[in-house]
Amino acid sequence: MGFKFPPPHIQHINELLRQGEGINLDFKQTLSSMSKIACTIVAFANTNGGTLLIGVSDDKRIVGIREEEEIYMLENAASAFCQPEVPMTLIVHEIQGKMLIEAQIPESQAKPHAARDEEGKYWVYIRNEDKTLKASREMFEVMKRNSRQAPVLVKMNETETRVIKTLAEQGSVSFSYLESLPGMKKRYLSEALILLVRAGVVRIKPGEPEDQYVYIIPKADL
């Protein structure tokens, strides 16, 4: 884990504050729980990477922190509460006498990462807009198989054909909607969606309470 102690980058911090929270940026006034911050860390690593800015209130005011305590929390969260460990770079800023920590978390090549909760259970998280969400089984399997570079072999059986036909007609639908179709079996549906997503035929849109699935129209059909 690398450490940098640059001079204050006020313009850089102000730009992050103007940008606001989103898929790649999260503000924390302080860190109260290593298990909770581990969820955000793995979510960034499992998605597109991101930045944690610690010492900023919900209304974007710089409130400052005790950097030694927050660095300890971050280091232990990344190593003891993330599986596998998530590497990150910590940058300490001092602005108008107040200390901030900028934690830069790159997108991981070792997905999926999981965060340990207070009961010792591990859960996989992803980012969606400015939220940290638990990954669905399908999203988890897509990340796991992609990281192992397992070959994608899609046989257009009845389930795959019905999924594509439904998505082409409906636009965006949930797993529950697809499962409710007559004769659709959950196990076969889950595997079909995983394969179709990995093949680039279908896209997962993470969301609450369920992911949505979207058919990717082939360029030749546009």
Image: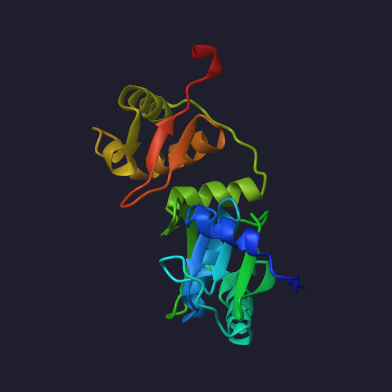
Identify the colour scheme used.
rainbow
Location of residue 73 by image quarter: bottom right
- State the residue at coordinates (33%, 42%): 175
- Residue 183, given in percent of the width and then of the height, sits at 27, 34
Q: Nearer the viewer, residue 133 or 191?
A: 133
- For the question of whether residue 212 can be seen, the reply is yes
Residue found at the far front of this picture: 96
Q: Please state the horizontal and vertical placement of residue 123, each as a whole percent of the image.
A: 47, 66
Q: Is residue 156 above or below residue 87?
A: above
Q: Nearer the viewer, residue 164 or 50?
A: 50
- Residue at image position (44%, 52%) is 137
Name which residue lies at 75% across and 74% down. 5
Residue 113 appearing in the image: no
Q: How many marks?
A: 0
Left or right, 200 with respect to 134, comes to: right
- Front in this rendered view, residue 177 or 161: 177
Residue 82, percent across and down?
Answer: 58, 71
217 up-or-down from 84: above or below: above
Q: Quadrant of residue 100?
A: bottom right
**Measuring 44% from the left and 50% from the top, which residue is drawn there?**
129
Q: Position of residue 81 (x, y in %)?
A: 56, 76
Quarter placement of the N terminus:
bottom right
